[in-house]
Amino acid sequence: MRGSGILLHISSLPGPYGIGTIGKSAYQLIDFLAKAGQKYWQVLPLGPTSYGDSPYQTFSAFAGNPYFIDLDTLVEEGYLEKRDLKSLAVVPDPHRVDFERIYKTRFPVLEKAYDRFLKKDDFKEFKKFIEENRFWLEDYALFMALKSVNVEGNWFGWTELHRIRDKETIDRFKKEHSDKIEFWYFVQYKFFEQWLKLKKYANNKGIKIIGDMPIYVAYDSSDVWANPKYWQLDKNLVPKVVAGVPPDYFARTGQLWGNPIYNYQLMKKDGYSWWIKRIEESFKIYDVVRIDHFRGFESYYAIKYTDKTAEFGKWIKGPGNSLFKKIKQSLGELEIIAEDLGFLTPEVYQLLEDTGYPGMKILQFGFDPNDDSEYLPHNYSPNSIAYTGTHDNKTLKDWLASITEEEKEFCFAYANINNEEEAVNKLIKCVLASPSETVIIPLVDYLELGEEARFNIPSTLGNNWVWRMDESDLTEELQERILKNTKTYKR
């Protein structure tokens, strides 16, 4: 069935405390989408951010971002008072996330909420949550608590006995710092309580949540620290190789992500249990999962840990369909989207065909005047997810300003564009009219924003993941325009 939706990260929602949350604005967006006839909201990854502020580099493959906990809800529940939030409400720029400021100010407030929680709650649901999520939550909470006592933030720079998880040392830490550990239990309890309530609200309105799963986890994560055997590390727990991609459209020297790469041989021997658990947990919080960098399962690009760029890596065979067969065998049929962008080979196309997962089509990649590109809408297959662009692309408006005159001429002719003013809207219609079963449009494109709303520039640090929408952006006129297009193209 044909459908459409929007792409917007939780952090980009408007609100009073410096970053979008699972609160009032999230519910208002769902109401807007339902009235506009949409079926999907793609939220991007929801994990806790670490170095670089990207949710593709997260402290846990399973945890939620504490920044997204709605503080006004905690006030309503009696765990905070309005005066506790007074300093947070003074935001220098409501349209930009200041991650450094939030890092310094958010946790003291959550600690106040935790202190009141200890005095008010009967702990029944809290204990249930801990027990149900112990397999990842225990390591994550311990990991975050250990960060607070080690001078070096990254686990691989901790004191040796903490780094190697010496049992006697860890047991002693648990006894001496049980309050620190339980605080992180509380943080995750509140995140998932709020998120699952929001997801239920969206589903009841006919909106499915598409969540993004980064293929890799961060080196500085509880996952790697707790289970180093699952990654290609040497005897000193240092990565032998790290992930990235070779030079491409996004970066001339490639993208050096720096994530450790999985020990797929060992994972296969134990039936891919870690991956199955990860997928299973993802489908508890999302309706559809987009797996990032899907081609890395066919072959992954491995770069020496000591290299400074991604130019000299090499391709190594990945687990292929053996992983996805095991996932299907264990979990049944799932709605998975394969992010199949980048350097594609016949083997990658074969893996897509074998799994049956829909791939992605990006309009911005299609306008080479000398090529009948697979990214031109008339070439999209029904089993695909079409986008004008993703969070990694320029906005449509900014992209139109950056292409060559030859490309623009072809683009305008293809989409029957007569002038610059109508260009963005007509390109959106072009994608909506395509054969793709599902179309996702970044909200920044519906808002026709330019360079100021660029969300992420791959292979760069700083000024990424910071754009926030304005409370006034979701107008009735925009809602009616989206609804009209949705009806016109039978979505």
Image: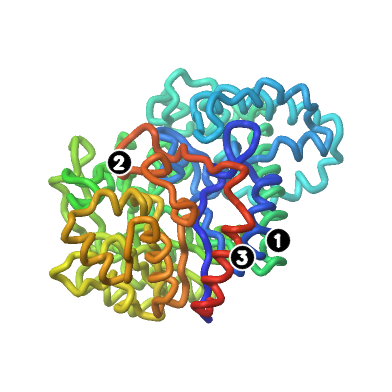
- Picture disc at residue 36: 3
Label 2 amino acid? Gly
> In the drawing, does residue 138 fall left or right of residue 244?
right
Q: Secondary structure at mark 1?
A: helix
Mark 2 = which residue?
Answer: 258
Give whichever of discs 3 and 1 has the lower sequence position. Answer: 3
Q: Secondary structure at mark 3?
A: loop
Q: Nearer the viewer, residue 253 or 188?
A: 253
- Picture disc at residue 200: 1
Label 3 amino acid? Ala
Asked if the residue under mark 3 is in contact with the one under mark 2, i.e. CB atoms within 8 Å, the reply is: no
Report x, y in % for residue 418.
Answer: 32, 65
Give whichever of discs 1 and 2 has the lower sequence position. Answer: 1
How far apart in space, not on screen, are marks 1 and 2 (Cα)? 36 Å
How far apart in space, not on screen, are marks 2 and 3 (Cα)? 40 Å
Give whichever of discs 2 and 3 has the lower sequence position. Answer: 3
Q: Nearer the viewer, mark 1 or mark 2?
A: 1
Report x, y in % for residue 478.
Answer: 57, 58
Residue at x-position 30% and y-position 41%:
258
Report x, y in % for residue 410.
Answer: 21, 67
Residue at x-position 33% and y-position 74%:
377
Q: Would you place residue 181 above or below residue 255 in this image?
A: above
Q: Nearer the viewer, residue 138 or 28?
A: 28
